[in-house]
Amino acid sequence: MNETNNHPDCQYILQVKDLHTSFFTDAGEVKAVNGVNFDLPPGKVLGIVGESGSGKSVTAYSILRILTEPGKTTQGEVIFRGEDVLRYSRRKVRDFRGARISIIFQDPMTSLNPTYTIGNQIDEAILLHTNRSREEARARSIELLRLVGVNEPQRRVKQYPHELSGGMRQRVMIAMALACEPDILIADEPTTALDVTIQAQILELMQELQQKLGMAIIIITHDLGVIADMCDEIIVMYGGRVCERGNAEDIFYRSKHEYTRGLLRSLPASNRSRDKLIPIPGSPVDMLRLPPGCPFAARCESAMKICLEQMPEELAMGGEHYASCWLNVRGTIKENADE
């Protein structure tokens, strides 16, 4: 057996290590991502959850290296199959995007070019990353549209984005992302602009494709309910940091961070359909002026003095469940003292 296969890092297709990304504006440095870490095994589904401005999408764009000025990744590593993507040359990055990792953006209407047909846009991705001829690329485009459930694909390839419904355009975006059979698919709020019925269809389609093609998926959302049934691991982000991580049962039934609990309380539930939703008090943290302590402390009803002054370390809660919260540290200290 090859010794390198025994190395613990070989079990992951992607590793994000101590990732920091900032936007350098006239007002100052906006620290959008602050030390994010996670591992993605091949063929697994990772959910990244948090409200707007928590750093979810910026993390994805940093991995793909599609940040534009004034954004810049200032620290960390993005390890794909043993190599740091952040050290890739421009040519290697171009080959990496699309061929090895793809993204579905949240608004298919603005992501698709309104002046090109659906077929031309899918063809372009295939021609860029493969050696197929134009005829072979068009045949592949039709095959992909059929795979993602677009009816009459031979006719659809000749249509323009405005001629398709929102759900159909999102299916086209998925087909484009799958054009080169990537190892990793990132879905950035893939159901935001869709009604509830179409949302369920798109998520079901992604699950079916993941099982059929064996690719890993990173799904980014502000709604925990969207990913409850499809993720092997969920990480919850706030203030550019991971505040809690674990499987669905850990997050939904054994949550240990007050922000995660706040997100769960704000979800509608069938058993309390007549009750009002419970919002998280306060406003999101100012990423231009991050506090020295826990970024959620100012909104947390259980905050202690230390929460305002010092950022807690990530603490193991059992199994693969981790949380960064001083309340858990205090509980651990008390348990040790009792023993």
Image (tube, grey):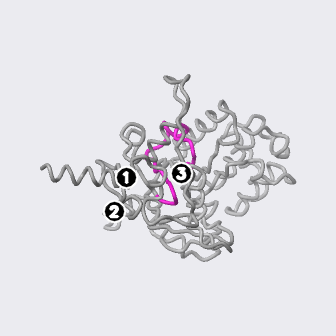
Secondary element at tag 2: helix
Dot 1 surroundings within 10 Å: few (below 14), some, or many (20 or more)?
many
Is 129 situated left or right of 236 in this image? Answer: right
Residue 323 marker: 1
Is 69 situated left or right of 242 in this image? Answer: right
Q: Residue at x 41, y 42 (%)?
A: 251
Task: Give, as a three-letter code, the residue at label 3.
Answer: Ile
Is 175 situated left or right of 296 in this image? Answer: right
Query: In 3D space, how far apart are the residues under numbered discs 2 and 3 (Cα atoms)?
Result: 21 Å
Query: Does residue 40 lie above or below 74 as drawn?
Result: above
Residue 218 marker: 3
**Given this view, does label 1 or label 2 mark the residue nearer the observer?**
1
Q: Position of residue 180 (x, y in %)?
A: 64, 56
The answer to which of 189 and 168 lies nearer the viewer is 189
Name of the residue lying farthest toward the right: 115
Residue 8 marker: 2
**Given this view, does label 2 or label 3 mark the residue nearer the observer?**
3
Range covered by the magenta-colored residues: 218-241
